Amino acid sequence: MKPILTKSDYSTIKELILNTPSHMITKEISLLAREIEKAKKVPDSKIEPQVIRINSVFEVQDVSSGQLLNFQLTLPKDGNIAEKKLSILSPLGVALIGFQEGMEIEWVLPGGLKKLKILTVGTSVVS
């Protein structure tokens, strides 16, 4: 499965990675760099609304535990877990960017390998 990115999200993320000082490059940043390079890049006007992109609001479910997670995917400067704003540089943000509603993905998160199902994707603010 290849992620799908808008050209503007690709440019924004690429610039973010390039402007990160080398001593601050984390495993997640390295993984994100790999993910965006293999992604299919599409014009902003051609992206399906069900694809998770920067500022998307989404709900995912941990397939094994049934736990539901609701977040808005943001740039690092806007990330705030208390407000359910998840940084693109977080492990979950890296795992989900570019994938769409209905898909199941497997990704190594801090709690181990997780299988996640993307239930909904939208543009409303998380409550």
Image: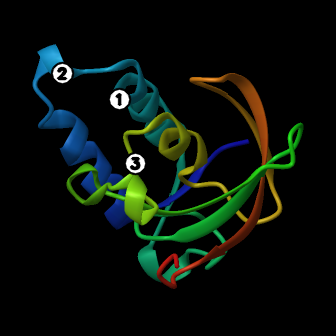
Instruction: Calculate the distance from the C-alpha at mark 3 to the C-alpha at mark 1.
Output: 9 Å
Residue drawn where x is 43% and y is 39% of the image = 90
Q: Quadrant of residue 36?
A: top left
Please, what secondary structure does the residue beneath circle 2 have? helix
| Mark 2 touches mark 1? (CB < 8 Å) | yes
Q: Nearer the viewer, residue 108 or 43?
A: 108
- For disc 3, the neighbor class at 10 Å (few under 14, some 14 to 19, many from 20) is many
Dot label at residue 29: 1
Instruction: Calculate the distance from the C-alpha at mark 3 to the C-alpha at mark 2.
Output: 15 Å
Residue drawn where x is 80% and y is 55% of the image = 103
Q: Which residue is mark 3?
A: 88
Amino acid found under the numbered disc labelled 2 = Met
Q: Quadrant of residue 44?
A: bottom left
Q: Nearer the viewer, residue 55 or 13?
A: 55
Q: Position of residue 108 (x, y in %)?
A: 64, 24
Residue drawn where x is 27% and y is 49% of the image = 76
Q: Position of residue 94 (x, y in %)?
A: 49, 40
Instruction: Calculate the distance from the C-alpha at mark 2 to the C-alpha at mark 1.
Output: 9 Å
Please, what secondary structure does the residue beneath circle 1 have? helix
